[in-house]
């Protein structure tokens, strides 16, 4: 079993289709897997995010408007503020809009438009390129993916949905099409040529690994790499063009320690929001492209520090009253600002930093451990089926705020690019492993007689699957930086 964190476990939403809009609060039983396995590489005790904001007399507030804002964000964590997205609705969330067209002339294998306005002049696909890569729709591509689950030796078993017995395959065939231009199909040969002699690093959590493995799977169809490195830094080397793909684990992208601090005991993670994570920063000058993934660990038990002062906590209560100044959501925004500012101010870093925006989960009807489910989703959501996730929206907003603040502090020649996938991927509830997380022939894949869903992963992405689109976007961002100008046809870009 592999889940990077219990995202969505505070969210209450609805099931559509065969589940007939049934609200569910049923608990999930994790079969034979312990909760400590959820984080994959870093084992830790899991706790229910539903309990994270229970009232306690041990945490004193100052009664300010800022405390009210924190309480409001805590309510979002607890309830998700979920509502079904109707076809007639249109909404905007500070720079994000979603539009739909359900006309009779719509092609049967094209889904309605999703759009994200250009968020910043440094974000790829907006001002600097003349086309918003993230305003578009999903369409069915009968040619299928570039690799099969059994043609990629690096694919993690938990994301090997076909190998784990998932009976449907249509989720592999939906591709993203921007409205104003073509997004070329991934071309492994082109990628290696563009990255000749260069190094690309994936830095972040298990979703970063998900994207890295997707890239390696597609490149493997062109050339088998050599594997090097250790548990701190994994490396794959493509000898033909001297290209290196690196992966570094960084849960929060900022400095963290488990050592005692004041009243906070050993074992409770202390997250220093003003210090970047030295785990990857010590190597940053060696990287030409860095793809960042974060956010999913901010529901885990932790204490937030700014300049060695406790300013917030998640799932931890101090023995003496402390005024908590920030929520976990605000802490996420600060971590983004800190890590990106360190990168754009590093005197020896001149590379491209691609910030992949917050990856949405699809635990409908509850959390990962409270009845949440994506079972039975076999196609991208239609607008009438789309479930608005308040937690995802505010995490995305805080991430963009940190991104924009970091841009203003840039002092080096590096480039900061935003890969804004959050809105587009809110439609892809079909792309997760769901209950098909292992090859165990005895695993539970259907609801119990009383309606409880089976244990499942609705956070990570099947491979092949929607996650491959992230690397099509990454390749286009890199190509635009090195070559410039959009291509309006993908006929010559198939590997």
Image: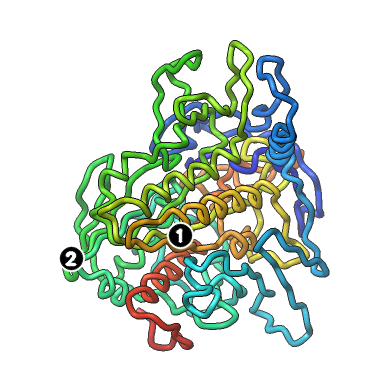
Residue 269 horizontal side relative to residue 358, left or right: left
Which residue is situated farthest in the top direction here?
319
Q: Residue at x 70, y 42 (%)?
A: 11
Q: Which mark is residue 49?
A: none
Q: Residue at x 59, y 49 (%)?
A: 398
Vertical placement of residue 135 versus 163, above or below: below
The quarter of the image holding the C terminus is bottom left
Tag 1 secondary structure: loop
Residue 287 horizontal side relative to residue 119, left or right: left
Q: Which residue is mark 2?
A: 242
Q: Give the image location of residue 19, x and y in percent.
A: 77, 53
* Front tag of 1 and 2: 2
Q: Give the image location of residue 133, x and y in percent.
A: 53, 73
Q: Which residue is mark 1?
A: 463
Name the residue nearer the viewer: 104 or 451.
Answer: 104
Residue 135 horizontal side relative to residue 234, left or right: right
Q: Residue at x 31, y 51 (%)?
A: 346
Mark 2 is surrounded, within 10 Å at the Cα level, by few (under 14), some (14 to 19) or many (20 or more) other residues, namely: some
Mark 1 is surrounded, within 10 Å at the Cα level, by few (under 14), some (14 to 19) or many (20 or more) other residues, namely: many
Residue 383 horizontal side relative to residue 311, left or right: right
């Amino acid at each position: 079993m592999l889940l990077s964190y219990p995202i969505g476990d505070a969210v209450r939403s609805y099931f559509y289709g065969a589940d007939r809009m049934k609200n569910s609060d049923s608990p999930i039983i994790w079969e034979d897997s312990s909760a400590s396995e959820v984080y994959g590489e870093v084992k830790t005790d899991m706790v229910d995010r539903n309990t994270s904001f229970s009232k306690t007399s041990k945490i004193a507030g100052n009664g300010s408007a800022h405390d009210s804002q924190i309480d409001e964000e805590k309510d979002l964590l607890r309830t998700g503020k979920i509502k079904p997205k109707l076809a007639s609705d249109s909404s905007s969330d500070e720079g994000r809009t979603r539009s739909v067209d359900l006309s009779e002339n719509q092609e049967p294998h094209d889904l309605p438009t999703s759009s994200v306005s250009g968020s910043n002049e440094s974000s790829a696909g907006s001002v600097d390129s003349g086309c918003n890569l993230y305003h578009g729709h999903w369409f069915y591509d009968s040619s299928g993916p570039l690799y099969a689950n059994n043609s990629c030796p690096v694919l993690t078993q938990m994301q090997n949905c076909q190998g784990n017995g998932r009976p449907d395959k249509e989720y592999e065939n939906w591709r993203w099409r921007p409205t104003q231009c073509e997004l070329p199909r991934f071309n492994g040969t082109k990628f290696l040529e563009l990255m000749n002699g260069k190094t690309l690093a994936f830095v972040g959590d298990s979703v970063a690994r998900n994207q890295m493995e997707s890239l390696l799977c597609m490149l493997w169809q062109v050339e088998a790499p050599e594997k090097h490195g250790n548990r701190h830094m994994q490396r794959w080397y493509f000898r033909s063009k001297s290209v290196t793909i690196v992966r570094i684990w960084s849960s929060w992208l900022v400095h963290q320690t488990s050592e005692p601090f004041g009243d906070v005991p050993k074992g409770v993670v202390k997250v220093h929001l003003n210090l970047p994570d030295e785990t990857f920063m010590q190597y940053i000058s060696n990287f030409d492209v860095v793809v960042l993934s974060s956010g999913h660990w901010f529901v885990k038990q932790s204490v937030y520090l700014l300049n060695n002062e406790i300013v917030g906590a998640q799932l931890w209560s101090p023995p003496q009253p402390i005024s908590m100044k920030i929520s976990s959501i605000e802490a996420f925004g600060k971590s983004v600002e800190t890590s990106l500012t360190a990168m754009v101010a590093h005197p020896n870093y001149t590379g491209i930093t691609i910030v992949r925006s917050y990856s949405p989960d699809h635990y409908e009807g509850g959390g990962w451990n409270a009845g949440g489910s994506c079972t039975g989703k076999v196609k991208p959501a239609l607008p009438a089926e789309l479930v608005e996730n308040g937690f995802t929206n505010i995490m995305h907003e805080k991430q963009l705020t940190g991104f924009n603040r970091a841009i203003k502090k840039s002092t080096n020649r590096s480039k900061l690019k935003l890969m804004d996938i959050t809105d587009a991927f809110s439609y892809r509830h079909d792309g997760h492993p769901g209950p098909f997380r292992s090859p165990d022939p005895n695993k539970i894949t259907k609801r119990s007689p009383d309606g409880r869903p089976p244990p499942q992963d609705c956070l990570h992405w099947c491979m092949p699957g929607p996650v491959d689109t992230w690397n099509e976007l990454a390749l286009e961002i890199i190509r635009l930086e090195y070559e410039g100008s959009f291509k309006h046809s993908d006929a010559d870009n198939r590997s």
